[in-house]
Amino acid sequence: MRESSSWKILGLKEIAQSKNLPTTFIVGVSIGDRKLEGSQFLALMRKINELSKSIDLRFCFIAICDTLQRYNYMIDGKINEEVALATSARAGEIWIKKNSESLQELHVPYKIIRWSEWQERVDFKSIISRVEDAYNEDSNFKMAVNQSAMSFSSRFKKRYEEANGKEACINIDESLLQECCRRYLIEESAVIMHYWPEYESATQKIILYPGRMTAALEIAYEKFVHQKSTFQWKKYRFKEVASTECLHSIPSTLADMLNKHSPVNFLENFEGSDKKVFLVSLAAYTSIMQCQHRPLTEILYLLENYTKFLLDKAESIEMPESVLSRSLFYTPQLTSLTTRKDSSSTIQPAFDLLGKTTALENHS
């Protein structure tokens, strides 16, 4: 059977030590960052659930930085700000739709906040002006913004060349490129360091993001955030792990059942080979029935891992190669079931059959 992979979230152990402090998480989502979607974003939601068991986590804001990305669409001078704004807003809508099932996994009360909500604040322009003034008056802040802008523009040109050919950057207006990067950093600093600390004033706020603050954000943090002890930035990172490793971290009712009531012992009426086949079927049944609202990729991942988990538990039973082939027959069958539009009506009868010895014997 092909080995699956999953993700661990590293770098957040310190948070678990602040047990007695009421806490709000602000999950920063940069649209277009592949680390913040799909299975990796799902892993982050589950990590938050895990942390909520050891700290006083009151609320979670999912901060969608979508229309901030309009500057990236304007950067080559081909579209104006109005079109860039609409395009970036649409990208945010697509992200929310694609990751809605992962968000439903979150056990903590949460709210999605999109960048436009801050743009529409009555004091937004004055906040931007305040940061612009700091840029013009504070040489350290100005240097940090310019350095971050240079870094951003270098990465953009590299990606642009990869997508459009080595000669593509010749036609890019360098001054426009730098100005778009600068405006991006000014607006990012204004929103994050002025508006985000306001949320849930009775709690400490922790920004969760898979990266460090830019040099510009670091100085903006020092200049504009007054209650630094209650507003922190925590970088986390992802580690890809093989299925055998991530099995140990799956909070599984089935795993508890296996450890306490070994099914290998209570299935006394089964032949040794059929015990294993039954366990494979039980694995498929449990993983599908417990994960009806998970993304399909996650369902298949759990299906495969529970199967392996149960086979390992039953390793003391002698199992000929022919029986192994017979047991693995069920995985592709159940995979096809999960992809059908009417799967909800077809899965249960299939499992009723899988749980019976007579049905198992028919595939001998």
Image: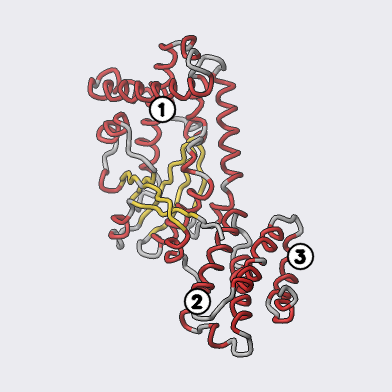
Q: Is residue 342 above or below residue 39?
A: below
Q: Which mark is residue 315?
A: 2
Q: Nearer the viewer, residue 289 or 18?
A: 289
Q: Is residue 52 above or below residue 133?
A: below
Q: CA distance from mark 2 to mark 3?
A: 34 Å
Q: Secondary structure at mark 1?
A: helix
Q: Which residue is at a point 31% across and 20% down the rendered structure image?
A: 146
Name the residue that disc number 1 marks.
187
* Type of the residue with mark 1: Glu
* Type of the residue with mark 3: Ser
Q: Which mark is residue 156?
A: none
The reply, left or right, for residue 262 in relation to residue 344 is: left
Mark positioned earlier in the residue sequence (2 or 3): 2
- Indicate the quadrant containing the N terminus: top left, top right, bottom left or bottom right: bottom right
Q: Which residue is at a point 43% across and 23% down the rendered structure image?
A: 158
Please count the marks in the image.
3
Q: Residues within 10 Å of mark 3 (few under 14, many from 20)?
A: few
Frontmost of labels 1 and 3 is 3
The reply, left or right, for residue 358 in relation to residue 311 is: right
